[in-house]
Amino acid sequence: MSRLWEWAYSFIVIPLFWMALKLIALVNAKTRRGIRGRAGLFESLAKQVARLPEGQRVWFHSSSMGEFEQAKPVIAELKRRRPGTQVVVSFFSPSGYEHSRKYRLADVITYLPLDTRRNARRFLDLVRPDAAVTVRYDVWPNHIWEMGERKIPVLIANATMRLHTRRRLPLARAFHRHVYNIIDDILTVAHSDVEAFRRFGLSHPVIQAIGDTRYDQVMARSDEARKRRIIPPAITDGKRVVVIGSSWPDDEEVVIPACLALQAEMGNMLLVIVPHEPTEEHLEDLERDLAGRAASIRFSALNEYSGESVVIVDSVGILLVLYAHAHVAYVGGSFQQGVHNVLEAAVFGIPVLFGPKHRNAHEPIMLVECGGGFVVGDEEELHRTLKNLLEDDAARSASGERAARFVASHTGATVRFLEHLERRLVGRP
């Protein structure tokens, strides 16, 4: 039966997946970049690997930039404990690959090839990892099956699984059981994830809840961010700063009107909008929407600041640093498919607001439970909640302290993960 699953995946699922990617690439620039970026993948990988000395090698795979942030504290701690260990980093998405090409702790950075059995063999022949770590959910079966045959230990970091996932539908359940049973350690974020994985009837992996390395990463990055004030004090002094982080148009339709109304009432509020995708088209749409309602300026033009009440951020990779300026933050995605990273705001000890679609992760729910986060269902509720927090210094401070304590109390997953990884490396040449 296992061979049947492997045949069906390799000769039906993957060809259909590749055809779908090619079709999507006709209208989606990001998908086109991913396909073009894989041209010459193996030749580039061979050159990078040829420069490496002998020694233990660990392969880290992430789907995209957000997942790679979760791998970074593990890589840093691994390098600190075992300085000679070589790290190979791979990505599925162009956003992860393009934004991480200069990551200094990686010895090799590459795209993951299309998940055919031939590509998996060729990739592993070149990389020759002593262990492999995939972050969160990006598990590619042919690479997993090939590593199983080669007895290469495979671990999942920050694994999550919903109890009522569609992966447990009759046929899907049998397929995923065959994949997950090859993995050695499935190290989850929460105990509910452990229960969800166990429902597949797995017999081989160690399944254990150890927490989420994102807490460790966001703590480390916040220490650096506090030293960087990228908005001059002359702009923020005497103002209540509200940062709208990783916003989509669905968020902006609700949040911007509420914030502009509040600005008109308070008069000393600076609104910083950080679009999730700051394309020129999106930036121009925002500027047109604000025209006649509020004076705005782009972040890249702040040296020409002349009292504008809205800053539109046209750069990427600086959101966490911007949260360090905020009195209150709203985290986007929560009026669309699901809220983005709330920890990046909470770590600075500020109240965190988000919309109704926030159950795609554990931390927004827990942040609300501890009093550091607030769910807002519409424009009126957002206006009311934000007004209360900005006008009541004591309430805002108390909520922010709860948010900061929440993040600090959940650190430590990196060390726990390294204990599992190092056990898998013991005895390997």
Image (cartoon, grey):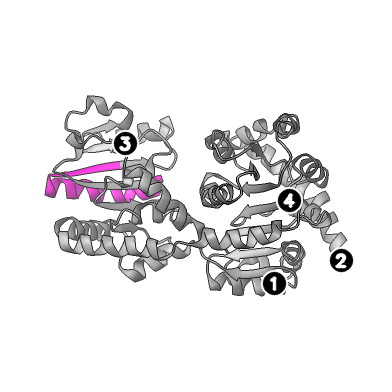
Q: Is residue 25 above or below residue 268?
A: above
Task: Specify the amino acid type for callout 4.
Answer: Asp
Question: Decide: marks 1, 2 in contact (CB < 8 A)?
Answer: no
Q: Give the camera-side residue of 106 and 297.
A: 106
Q: Residues within 10 Å of mark 4 (few under 14, many from 20)?
A: many
Mark positioned earlier in the residue sequence (4 or 2): 2
Which residues make up the magenta segment? Answer: 248-272
Left or right: residue 345 compared with residue 132: left
Please identify, in this view, whether the residue under mark 3 or under mark 4 is nearer the observer.
Answer: 4
Tell me if I can see residue 218 in this picture: yes
Residue tagged 4: 130
> Which residue shows up at 67% across the image and 64% down it?
185
Residue tagged 2: 1
Q: Quadrant of residue 24?
A: top right
Specify the label residue 200 is tagged with. 1
Mark positioned earlier in the residue sequence (3 or 1): 1
How many marks do you count on the picture? 4
Residue tagged 3: 312
